[in-house]
């Protein structure tokens, strides 16, 4: 999206269904359960930590 408008046409229902299936299959079994699912715990990689630090520094520099 750019400026609140789509930059590409919307997916077809079949493409959305396929993407959902792949996303669902990528979740751990415990997270896919209907009863008492266990949410996955996100991992903070070194790369993400560095990016977070950089963004926070840039935001702080604007004040």
Image (cartoon, helix red, strand yellow):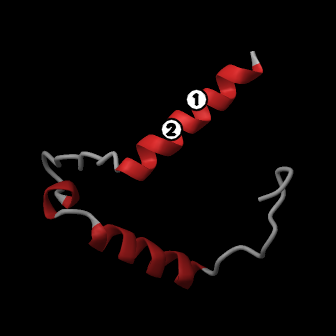
Where residue 1 sits: x, y (%)? 77, 59
Q: Residue at x 71, y 73 (%)?
A: 10
Q: Is residue 39 left or right of residue 53?
A: left
Where residue 29 sits: x, y (%)? 15, 64
Q: Is residue 29 above or below residue 15?
A: above
For label 1, the SS is helix
Contact flag, marks 2 and 1 (Cβ < 8 Å): yes
User: Which quadrant is the C terminus positioned in?
Assistant: top right
Q: Local crowd at mark 1 within 10 Å, few (<14), some, or many (≥20)?
A: few
Q: Residue at x 58, y 29 (%)?
A: 56
Residue under label 1: 56
Q: Local crowd at mark 2 within 10 Å, few (<14), some, or many (≥20)?
A: few
For label 2, the SS is helix
Q: Residue at x 17, y 47 (%)?
A: 38
Q: Residue at x 55, y 82 (%)?
A: 15
Seen from the viewer's position, the closer of residues 27 and 16 is 27
Q: Is residue 6 left or right of residue 13?
A: right
Tell me the tag on residue 52.
2
> From mark 2 to mark 1, how far is it between C-alphas?
6 Å
Tell me the tag on residue 23.
none
Q: Is residue 35 left or right of residue 23?
A: left
Q: Residue furthest top?
A: 63
Numbered circles on residues, count: 2
Seen from the viewer's position, the closer of residues 41 and 51 is 51
Where residue 3 sits: x, y (%)? 86, 51
Where residue 37 sits: x, y (%)? 17, 49
Q: Place residue 54 in its image quadrant.
A: top right
């Amino acid at each position: 999206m750019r400026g609140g408008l789509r930059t590409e046409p919307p997916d077809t229902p079949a493409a959305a269904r396929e993407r959902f299936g792949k996303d669902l299959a990528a979740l751990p079994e415990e997270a896919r359960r209907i009863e008492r699912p266990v949410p996955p715990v996100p991992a903070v990689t070194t790369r993400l930590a560095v990016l977070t630090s950089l963004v926070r520094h840039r935001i702080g520099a604007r004040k």
